[in-house]
């Protein structure tokens, strides 16, 4: 066999070995990178991240179904399943505290009922063996909203079930002739000393028959309907005229 034939045979043999080696290593490469071509760990992390709800979704859900927060004047009944001697009915004082058997004063205003239950079981657990406490809200400040401004019947109204801004205006007797219903303001308490304001174009919503922006009220909300410019103008200039006469040209 000539030298050139031997060289060709060696090149062919080497090529076949490379192909076999590549075929053997290919499954390991695909497993390491994953179907998308990137590292498998990154793909799994991406899938896991998609399963976690976003902050906006969680925030929207909490806004839609908020838990009632205890406040001054609420009446609570505490029942101890295994230690009935600690049972009591308590009223939240104006400063937000309650007086508890064997514990003394505890600040509870701002808590939800489940939060209070957890705190009580932890506090009484310091000397009781795994206490089971039922917290029953016997009396509370009924949810309400306030409608004010250019509505027929301004005042404070019970908030029963889902009520939107437009429904609140209807409950207050509707708008009067001086209302500027293109700039209705919804005031909502954001903290103890701060209100958040949202301007709603009720006129446009009603004209377009699109109520997607008609917000649902929360307890303590204030719906304010401002006065339009025309009615303000009429307050200072009588509609009967200003006592002037105009002489027609000759």
Image (cartoon, rainbow, N blue to C red):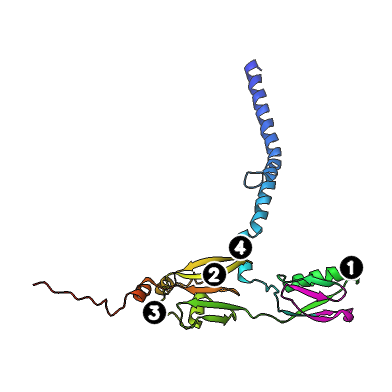
3D distance between C-alphas at marks 1 and 4: 38 Å
- Observer-nearest residue: 192 or 239? 239
3D distance between C-alphas at marks 3 and 1: 64 Å
The residue that disc 1 covers is 126
The residue that disc 3 covers is 177
User: Could you say which disc has been placed on residue 187 in the image?
Assistant: 2
- State the residue at coordinates (61%, 68%): 63
The reply to whether dot 4 and dot 3 touch (C-beta < 8 Å) is no
- State the residue at coordinates (64%, 44%): 38
- Observer-nearest residue: 187 or 209? 187
The reply to whether dot 1 and dot 4 touch (C-beta < 8 Å) is no
The residue that disc 4 covers is 57
Task: Look at the image and say whether residue 141 sits in the magenta stretch.
Answer: no
Q: Which mark is first along the chain, 3 or 4?
A: 4
Query: Going by the picture, which residue comes out furthest to the left?
Result: 250
Task: Look at the image and say whether residue 89 sits in the magenta stretch.
Answer: yes
Q: Is residue 2 visible?
A: no
User: Could you say which disc has been placed on residue 226 in the image?
Assistant: none
On-image quarter of the C terminus: bottom left
Part of the protein shown in magenta: 78-102
> Compared with residue 40, is residue 11 higher up or lower down, i.e. above or below?
above
3D distance between C-alphas at marks 3 and 2: 22 Å
Q: Quadrant of residue 23?
A: top right
Tell me the mark number nearer the camera, choosing from 2 and 1.
2
Would residue 19 appear left or right of 217 to someone viewing this image? Answer: right
3D distance between C-alphas at marks 4 and 3: 40 Å
Q: Which mark is first along the chain, 4 or 1?
A: 4
């Amino acid at each position: 066999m000539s030298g050139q034939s031997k060289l060709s045979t060696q090149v062919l043999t080497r090529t076949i070995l490379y192909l076999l080696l590549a075929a053997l290593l290919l499954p390991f490469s695909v497993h390491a990178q994953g179907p998308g071509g990137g590292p498998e760990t990154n793909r799994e992390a991406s899938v896991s991240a998609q399963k976690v709800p976003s902050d906006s979704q969680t925030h929207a859900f909490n806004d839609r179904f908020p838990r009632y927060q205890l406040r001054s004047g609420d009446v609570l009944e505490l029942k101890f399943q295994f230690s009935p001697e600690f049972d009591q009915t308590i009223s939240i004082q104006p400063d937000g505290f309650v007086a508890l058997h064997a514990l003394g004063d505890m600040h509870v205003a701002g808590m939800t009922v489940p939060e209070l239950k957890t705190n009580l079981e932890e506090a009484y657990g310091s000397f009781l063996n795994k206490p089971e406490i039922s917290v029953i809200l016997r009396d509370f400040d009924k949810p309400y909203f306030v409608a004010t401004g250019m509505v027929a019947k301004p005042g404070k109204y019970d908030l029963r079930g889902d009520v939107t801004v437009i429904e609140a205006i209807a409950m207050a007797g509707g708008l009067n002739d001086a209302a500027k219903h293109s700039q209705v303001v919804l005031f909502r308490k954001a903290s103890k000393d701060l209100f958040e304001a949202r301007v709603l174009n009720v006129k446009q919503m009603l004209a377009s028959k699109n109520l997607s922006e008609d917000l649902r009220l929360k307890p303590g909300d204030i719906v304010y309907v401002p006065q339009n410019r025309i009615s303000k103008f009429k307050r200072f200039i009588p509609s009967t005229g200003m006592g002037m006469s105009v002489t027609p040209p000759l």
